[in-house]
Amino acid sequence: MTTNTFTDPPVEMAKERGKTQFTVRDVTNFLNGGEEETQIVEKIMSSIERDPVLSVTADYDCNLQQARKQTMERVAALSPYLVTDTEKLSLWRAQLHGMVDMSTRTRLSIHNNLFIGSIRGSGTPEQFKYWVKKGAVAVKQFYGCFAMTELGHGSNLKGLETTATYDQDSDQFIINTPHIGATKWWIGGAAHTSTHCVCFAKLIVHGKDYGTRNFVVPLRNVHDHSLKVGVSIGDIGKKMGRDGVDNGWIQFTNVRIPRQNMLMRYAKVSDTGVVTKPALDQLTYGALIRGRVSMIADSFHVSKRFLTIALRYACVRRQFGTSGDTKETKIIDYPYHQRRLLPLLAYCYAMKMGADEAQKTWIETTDRILALNPNDPAQKNDLEKAVTDTKELFAASAGMKAFTTWGCAKIIDECRQACGGHGYSGYNGFGQGYADWVVQCTWEGDNNVLCLSMGRGLVQSALQILAGKHVGASIQYVGDKSKISQNGQGTPREQLLSPEFLVEAFRTASRNNILRTTDKYQELVKTLNPDQAFEELSQQRFQCARIHTRQHLISSFYARIATAKDDIKPHLLKLANLFALWSIEEDTGIFLRENILTPGDIDLINSLVDELCVAVRDQVIGLTDAFGLSDFFINAPIGSYDGNVYEKYFAKVNQQNPATNPRPPYYESTLKPFLFREEEDDEICDLDE
Amino acid sequence: MTTNTFTDPPVEMAKERGKTQFTVRDVTNFLNGGEEETQIVEKIMSSIERDPVLSVTADYDCNLQQARKQTMERVAALSPYLVTDTEKLSLWRAQLHGMVDMSTRTRLSIHNNLFIGSIRGSGTPEQFKYWVKKGAVAVKQFYGCFAMTELGHGSNLKGLETTATYDQDSDQFIINTPHIGATKWWIGGAAHTSTHCVCFAKLIVHGKDYGTRNFVVPLRNVHDHSLKVGVSIGDIGKKMGRDGVDNGWIQFTNVRIPRQNMLMRYAKVSDTGVVTKPALDQLTYGALIRGRVSMIADSFHVSKRFLTIALRYACVRRQFGTSGDTKETKIIDYPYHQRRLLPLLAYCYAMKMGADEAQKTWIETTDRILALNPNDPAQKNDLEKAVTDTKELFAASAGMKAFTTWGCAKIIDECRQACGGHGYSGYNGFGQGYADWVVQCTWEGDNNVLCLSMGRGLVQSALQILAGKHVGASIQYVGDKSKISQNGQGTPREQLLSPEFLVEAFRTASRNNILRTTDKYQELVKTLNPDQAFEELSQQRFQCARIHTRQHLISSFYARIATAKDDIKPHLLKLANLFALWSIEEDTGIFLRENILTPGDIDLINSLVDELCVAVRDQVIGLTDAFGLSDFFINAPIGSYDGNVYEKYFAKVNQQNPATNPRPPYYESTLKPFLFREEEDDEICDLDE
């Protein structure tokens, strides 16, 4: 029996869907956190899908200018929700919408999270009320941006060179850009939209430098959008992705703002120039934590979208055949294709567990901090504890942010390659998806810098443990004794499939790495200062962060499965085992050298990964359907729900590029003169004539 | 002493350049293959740089329509060289130009390499002459494309569904697209430019299917560029990258072509419908080998461009500081930054050695094949040998193509991340560079498919060796005995820095992997057929291809260093050692389980990589200057030769985005109505009135 390449796919998709052995809705609810959450999610998704302004159907053909305008229209359509959404709804909406439209998500979040978040987090309650009244929360006659980064300074807040000098005579601050290197750069919303910014600048009072603080600086006159005196703004122009975001640069030439525009929840400046430093240093990075926590969730959402596309396509695309078959083989049936995608599907599930945990901690911590008054001496202890917890969250979220954003970039890329040439088409979303995504690996904490700083924190925690002091819950395992003793005889198959063993194996690997690095550190600080010693151990710190974070994701995954309904548990367990065993495969060097596993175990693990891939393979349609994405959110014809990939892809290409003329627009001007050109054959002067 | 962030960089660049301990020109000549080649390279580069049509200064802001037109203008400017360039010049020109303009490079090469290459390789000498006379080589009234891929079939040539049915009455072939799934898809040049194509179609004569063959099919009438009867063409539209290439789709509805348009160097069809099959099967993939070999060289060229940008930037960018310093630290001085970039610089050098070897073999082999007549029985043996050699080259180049194109993608990505936010700017080239590049991992042999097929070949070679038969030179080491015997005491430092030891270590690792996989294969074929057995061993085949290819790159690098001038040898050796030791670090699992190295050796290797990074660090400006790229070819202000990165970057952004109006173009239509909107507060109907 032969097949018709064109009509076969939807038939196959129906068959594949029929193989599902569990109630898809149960997995959806497990991922969302319950039926009630699923209903919220569905309501938000349908409100996005219904709004014609938010239709992303033609987005892949937008050029930069069109994208900027369209994104503004979408910001306008979504702004009313900023006022009515609860915190939870707001997070869901941003994450779900971000899956298909990162530009709008960013452009809104610059105002809503970075600007408003800064005023709420670094301003006093009175200041917050004042800016709300001005229109900041309602986004009326008002749009805020976040002027932190400078041309010459990114991650290093202390190095920022913009100055805010107090002038006591006028009771004003003078905001100034001392040279072009201190130009505010990358400022999303500055080029086109913003009326105000939160500006990070060095506070200078009576000649003394008090470090970087936040100031609200008006940029444009509200009535006609003209620039305020002394403010220069330009457009940063083309970026790798997120064309819809109007990133700009800002220079301040002695711009005067009232003293009251300095955000004074922590440090304060009086009208006589007295600087009061708070009991605890300002959490200037407060507004950045929400971003970081959101990026872990985004990693899950974006990954799930692209995995759905690649796995659906793999279930209907045929290529080559094995001898004896009359039909070509579906690419999902090639063991190597399974190995490329199925561990990543498992990884994606694991990301959600990590994201949920981080988000929960963040909401609790923020609520606690905002309920406290940093200037009330009676609350000093509570505040101290809350700030310590925030710092710990900041550190823990660092590794998660780094590895999930990298993981998502890898997933988009691998999924694209798994779709062959069609992955390179603009209409299947991978190109824009990748270009829009990868800035997450750089902004709000460069991933490498985050990992190194987390690695430093892990060594410091280990030193605490060795000194018998208390450390946070997620790191306590470093002080435990390993329960694994490898006698060289190898590990039985049942153990290699046991969650307890796998978690313990990763903890042992992570613990040994951290303790070995700590040993080396203690050796080095005998002759070096701590900074130098940590620099010497950069590679080791990075590895510590990497393995600890992987360990954390694996443990969280297993822990959450314990709460799942019985019918889906075995399927989730397979995914978690696949994730854990594949993670070992990726790091065999560590497990061998730590004597956690034998070479024979590694062989066995290779086979188990193969087996688990086969076991998961028939469930991939169910496991991706469980993400609950309509074709609107998939926005890629080769990832259509019904599997009718060629028809929808062909239709999409032709809808976006109607074939009206066999001649290109430049036929007369360029192509024809080229094809019909004639070089003159110059006669040679005959010297002998 | 404090520094001025803005003016510091060029001062620092001059100092860094001053640290160079070797004659840069010597390394340039080493890379190019001698002073004579360097002069050729420089002449071509300056001819590109001088031509205003080829200026890429504004490319990053081009939209798709502009890119298509501009690319056509560039094709026109470069076409005369197709006639005058020798093979060598043509390769250099394509590779050098491709570094900054992949679209033009591709659009030209579709005609010149794929179309012309097919006619030369698969047509008879008479057929080639005929098409030359028609204007094919002069590109006059003529533009060719390569209609291979179909919507439903990519890599699997045998699965293509377009038919070429011989009609004896008219002595014609009827070319037909049986259903939409067989639509020719991705065909570069089809949407706008081409008058003719080489079409891959199933040859059917008197009802019998003779497999896929090549046919020249006219697509458009030359005089007015209108479509030929029965030809439908559409535009594929937006792609991830290479916007300047007019990829299209083609459907044939019983299009008639003369029998003489079938390319008949191998199989022939007579006017009575007699099919003569050649002594050896057609090398249909002949035209693809040039592409594959070129892609290895491209990997080097593109990698060197982005490494130059990231390393120059790293030498002038400061961020954070170590305690005690008054200036912030240059990012190149962070050990982790060195580890991120310097092994990749070494990798890039290694790619060039691999590329040179592949190119040399390819030119020799092609010349030999073209000199032979496949229908002369006396030449049968020579032809057989030449075809076998081509097949061997095809197999060997598979792994090199796969791992160098992936390597280059990784290098672009890592370099972008190493430039922080400025790496995400459109004007520093990484975004377009990556998007344009990564199709190389998919086309002309999907990298994963190539690796699996190479892995199969390696196992087959091992079986030959075990049976005492002859195999190609590059694989003979698999039959040797390892000279490494690890007694568990560890490896002395001098050994770990010795080329002989490192090559042998990689050969042992590769040999053991291949032999272990071969053992498993022999076990499996007792109960499975060979195809099934190889499928079971997919992961292992991939690993065999990966480690063998790395081994090959490392050996080639050391072998070439032997030919280098004495003053540069020590610097090249450091790079090669860095590449080899870093490669071990990336694969410690294999070296430990094969008992080639001990855990203690791995620790030592970590330190040696650190040491080598420090040793190479001061030479990075010299080692990247040696690539000989002017700022035109760098095309990224943060990678400027003079290090004046902020001034040039600021100027570029403002030149491309002049700040003329603080209001965006959509202020009146969209932004103002949004900022000044008023929701109506509906009064509530009072029921009690």
Image (cartoon, coloured by chain):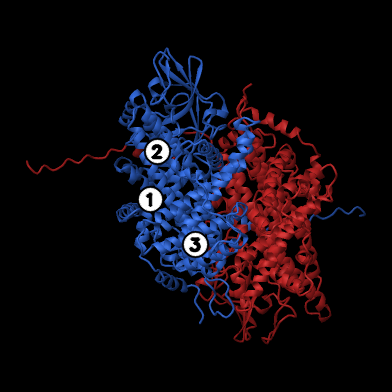
Chain colours: A blue, B red
Which amino acid type corresponds to the residue marked 2 in the rendered image? Asn
Give the chain of mark 1.
Answer: A
Nearest to the eye among marks 2 and 1: give it. 2
Is circle 2 on the same chain as circle 1? yes
Q: Is residue B259 above or below residue B456?
A: below
Is circle 3 on the same chain as circle 2? yes
Nearest the eye: B586 or A100: B586
Q: Which element is circle 1 on?
A: helix
Nearest the eye: B478 or B689: B478
Q: Earlier in the sequence, mark 2 or mark 1?
A: 1
Q: Which element is circle 2 on?
A: helix
Residue located 50% across and 65% down the image: A612
Which amino acid type corresponds to the residue marked 1 in the rendered image? Leu
Q: Quadrant of the C terminus of chain B?
A: top left
Q: Quadrant of the N terminus of chain B?
A: top right
Give percent across and percent down for residue A462: 53, 39
Q: Is residue A348 above or below residue A266?
A: below
Give the chain of mark 2.
Answer: A
Residue under label 1: A54
Residue A253 visible in rendering: yes
- Please identify the residue farthest to the left as the structure is shown: B689
Give percent across and percent down for residue A661: 52, 62
Residue B121 visible in rendering: no
Mark on residue B31? none
Which amino acid type corresponds to the residue marked 3 in the rendered image? Leu
Q: Label 2 neighbourhood size at 10 Å, few (<14), some (14-19), many (20+)?
A: many
Nearest to the eye among marks 1 and 3: give it. 3
Residue under label 2: A113
Q: Earlier in the sequence, mark 3 or mark 2?
A: 2
Residue under label 3: A497
Cα gap from disc 3 to disc 2, whole angstroms: 43 Å
Q: Is residue B569 left or right of residue A288?
A: right
